[in-house]
Amino acid sequence: MATTDQTVSGVPGRYANALFELAKENNSIEAVGAQLADFQAAIAGSEDLQRMVRSPVFKTEDQQAAVEAIAAKGKIGGIALNFLKLVAKNRRLPAISEMIKVYQSLMATEKGETLAEVTSAEKLSAAHVKDLKAALKSSLGRDVQLSTRVDAAILGGLIVKVGSRMIDNSLKTKLDNLKIAMKGTA
């Protein structure tokens, strides 16, 4: 069972694991995962939605209505919609992003893949993503499911997270380390 994975802990882990087991029983792991990814993308694309998800000021009914509106627009239904409505009803929306991340990790483990997060200063091209997946696959010995995000604050380079390991090869970190080294010589 997937619960042996270290990523399944706390509230997000319990919710994600329960959803994963339900989706597995209904042979809809991939469909639920895709719908959750669509929901996450909708939130990431709107500051108002991010505020609504994080803020305890909004009433449960308002959060549920927002979830249903996002679901209707994104064609999210069935198990995924019921899960999102339950999360809103239980006032757990601030943890939804982490729940989705844990679900994706469980999904990757089920498929024999490893989940990796890559942060770059600019959007990676399809060729770069393909090369990065190949490099990670040769290093880890298994297929890699890659999620990318852009953070201009790192200036350049990449930050790669695989499980609890992180490789920070960003220009910002290198400059910070150089600054610390220069202080030591002065």
Image (cartoon, grey):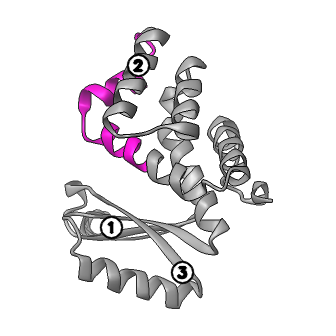
Cα–Cα span, label 1 and label 3: 33 Å
Q: Is residue 176 above or below residue 57?
A: below
| Image position of 50 (left or right of 23) | left
Amino acid type shown at disc 2: Ser
Mark 2 or mark 3, whichever is nearer to me: 3
Instruction: Name the mark on residue 26.
Output: none
The residue shown at (71%, 57%) is 6
Range of residues picked out in magenta: 37-58
Q: Is residue 139 above or below residue 53?
A: below
Image quarter hosting the C terminus = bottom left
Residue 3 percent coordinates (x, y): 77, 54
Instruction: Name the mark on residue 177.
Output: 1
Amino acid type shown at disc 1: Asn
| Image position of 155 (left or right of 13) | left
Q: Is residue 87 above or below residue 60?
A: below
| Image position of 89 (left or right of 123) | right
Residue 118 percent coordinates (x, y): 38, 66
Q: Which residue is mark 2?
A: 55
Which of the pair 161/66 is nearer the observer? Answer: 66
